[in-house]
Image (spheres, grey):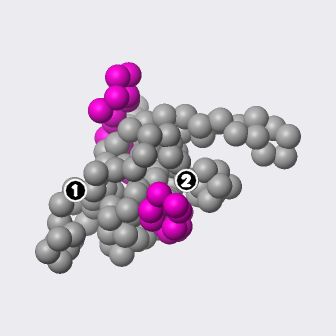
Amino acid sequence: MAIGETTVTVVGNISSEVFMKDTHSGSVAGFWLRSNERRYDKESGEWCNGRSLAVRVSCWRRLAENVRDSLSKGDPVVVSGRLYTTEFVTDGQSRTVTELEAQAVGPNLSWCTSGVQRNPRGRNRPDPGHGVGETAEPAMATASAA
């Protein structure tokens, strides 16, 4: 863990297709995650939408392969990892996107069921991660939140 690193857990739904890309640093999977707040309105007696968060998630190496093989658009998930913002220029305009480099991703069992299938021997150790500062900029910078 780095000094000043922001680690968060976000509960939400995958709001885009999961894509996979091979880089010089290993495989990376990415998707957009949307978390919507729901509040109970006492006056109307109904549930209503509150604030929402859209974050671009990147998963590296073994986690990337497992996400690709296990999850798809619309799935409820819990994602934990390092939160940061990336700035880039598209069509001459500066843009900022919130990104979450996932350390763990799993189905949200409050909203679905899931069977666990362990990886074959030798693939069951946690991934040591990738080099400092590596991101999936080109493929993910052009993705849009669903």
Residue at x 44% of width, y 62% of height: 26
- Could you tell me which quadrant the C terminus lies in? bottom right
Secondary structure of the residue carrying numbered label 2: loop
* Label 1 close to label 2 by CB (< 8 Å): no
Residue drawn at x 45%, y 65% as measured from the top left: 27
Which residue is at the front of the view, 53 or 60? 60
- Horizontal and vertical percent position of residue 35: 43, 46
- In the image, farthest residue toward the right: 92
Relative to 26, 97 lies left or right: right
Task: Locate residue 120, reporting x and y percent.
Answer: 17, 77
Against 129, residue 27 (above or below) is below
For residue 92, which quarter of the picture?
A: top right
Q: Position of residue 133 (x, y in %)?
A: 49, 40
- The residue identified by callout 2 is 136
Distance in Å between CA atoms under marks 1 and 2: 20 Å
Left/right placement of residue 86 relative to residue 65 reads: right
Mark 2: give few (<14), some (14-19) or many (20+) Cα within 10 Å: many
Quadrant position of residue 87: top right
* Residue 79 shows in the view: no
Q: Which residues are magenta?
A: 1-28
Q: Quadrant of the N terminus?
A: top left
Residue that lies at the very extreme toward the top in this rendered image: 4
Is 54 within the magenta? no
Please give the residue where the numbered disc 1 appears in the rendered image: 126
At 39% across and 50% down in the image, what residue appears? 130
- Ranked by sequence position, the earlier of labels 1 and 2 is 1
